[in-house]
Amino acid sequence: MLLFALVATAAPVDVAGIRYDDSLDVRGQRLELNGAGVRYKAVFKVYAAGLYLGRKVSTVEEVLAQPGPKRISITMLRDIDANELGKLFTKGVEENSPRAELAQLIPGLVRMGQMFADQKQLKAGDTFYVDWWPGAGSQVVVKGVPQGEPIREPAFFNALLRIWLGPAPADWKLKDALLGKG
């Protein structure tokens, strides 16, 4: 029976047809799937998201304080103008970040906005992720291609996470799902 329990916990998670492995290796570091869910806009599924951390946690404070590498992975469930998505992410950062922190986030937000503008469109099935790696910064990877140099501002990755985990999240059900409560 114990063997069955171990096998059952190692299964990938399926979210709206998107597979999230229970763990993955990022630069030789094992990250665990903390949670995964769907971002809805009205009744439409927009994207699936998975949050990977060094160890599972259940509160926003624990996610933001956790040392080591982290990843937020997003797979589009519908076609969307990439520039518009970049603008929505910028708005999400602005709505969920402490005012005193916003000034230091501007260079990273401008770069991220340009990365999405360069994509033109993200189609259903396209994936992008952002890795946080201590000492290196936040690396945005779209459709498997790193987008320039990492964004070095240490607060940038946590500001991105607040889009989904902050006090005014993009989707409350997705927030719960990323925290492993959904």
Image: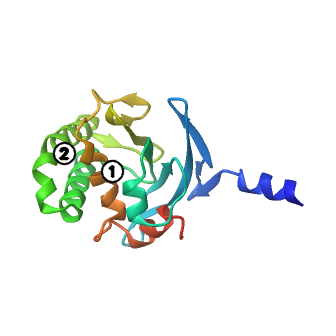
- Residue at 71%, 51% in the rendered image: 11
The residue carrying mark 2 is 109
Q: Which mark is residue 162?
A: none
Q: Which of the image's four quarters has the C terminus? A: bottom right
8 and 67: which is toward the camera: 67
Mark-to-mark CA distance, 2 and 1:
19 Å
Residue 21 seen in the figure: no
Residue 143 seen in the figure: yes
55 and 71: which is toward the camera: 55
133 and 166: which is toward the camera: 133
**Percent from the top left, x then y, of residue 139?**
34, 35
Q: Does label 2 or label 1 sit earlier along the sequence?
A: 1
Left-right relation of 138 to 87: right
Give the amino acid type for the residue marked by disc 1 in the picture.
Ile
- Residue at 51%, 61% in the rendered image: 57
- Residue at 12%, 61% in the rendered image: 99
User: For mark 1, does the 10 Å Cα neighbourhood hold few (<14), some (14 to 19), or many (20 or more) residues?
Assistant: some
Left-right relation of 182 to 101: right
Left-right relation of 178 to 105: right
Q: Which of the image's four quarters has the N terminus? A: bottom right
